[in-house]
Image (cartoon, rainbow, N blue to C red):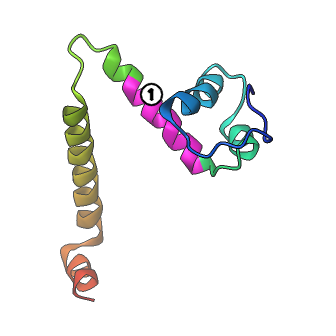
């Protein structure tokens, strides 16, 4: 990786996040190696990779979505997934959980 553990990073800007994400996408390193190298959680690094993939997909669209549209779509998808998960547990059980 281009940075070492000795490089103390106080703030992970988008530009700094890009370097390990590109190396992961190119297969030069793994999420677990990057997370160990920079003392980050694997889920944090995986989140960066997922964000990068969504951004790449959007930028390659014929009509890219604006940032607000991207977040609104993501919110709708999460709400739909939550609704499906709530339906799987049953309305009574969900209501019981909400009442506690």
Q: Residue at x 44, y 27 (%)?
A: 53
Residue 98 picture location, percent across and down: 24, 81
Q: Residue furthest bottom?
A: 100
Determine which residue is flagged by label 1: 53
- Res 45 → quadrant: top right
Depicted 1 relative to depicted 64: above or below:
below
- Magenta stretch prevailing secondary structure: helix
> x%, y% of residue 62?
24, 10
Horizontally, is 17 left or right of 78 in the view? right
Residue in the foreground of this view, choosing between 97 and 56:
56
Q: Is residue 53 magenta?
A: yes
Is the C terminus in the top left, top right, bottom left or bottom right quadrant? Answer: bottom left
| 61 w.r.t. 99: above or below | above
Quarter of the figure with the N terminus = top right
Q: Is residue 28 above or below residue 92?
A: above
Residue at point 70%, 38% (across, down): 34
What's the residue at 55%, 47% (across, down)?
44
Mark count? 1
Answer whether residue 67 is magenta in the image: no
Circle 1 SS class:
helix
Indicate the position of residue 89 as horizontal and vertical percent values. Answer: 29, 70
The answer to whether 63 appears left or right of 32 in the picture is left
Q: Is residue 35 left or right of residue 14?
A: right
- Determine the image quadrant of residue 64: top left
Q: Is residue 53 left or right of residue 20?
A: left
Within 10 Å of disc 1 (Cα), the crowding (few <14, some 14-19, many 20+) is: some
Give coordinates of residue 66: x percent, y percent.
21, 26
> Which stretch is magenta?
43-55
Q: Please, is residue 85 above or below residue 54 in the view?
A: below
Quarter of the image holding residue 28? top right
The one nearer the camera, 39 or 69, is 39
């Amino acid at each position: 990786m281009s940075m070492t553990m000795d490089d103390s990073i106080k703030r992970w800007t988008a530009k700094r996040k890009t370097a390990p994400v590109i190396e992961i996408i190119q297969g030069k390193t793994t999420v677990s190696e990057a997370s160990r190298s920079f003392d980050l959680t694997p889920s944090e690094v995986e989140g960066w990779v997922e964000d990068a993939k969504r951004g790449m997909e959007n930028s390659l669209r014929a009509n890219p979505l604006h940032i607000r549209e991207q977040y609104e779509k993501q919110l709708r998808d999460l709400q739909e997934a939550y609704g499906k998960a709530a339906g799987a547990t049953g309305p009574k059980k969900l209501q019981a959980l909400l009442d506690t």
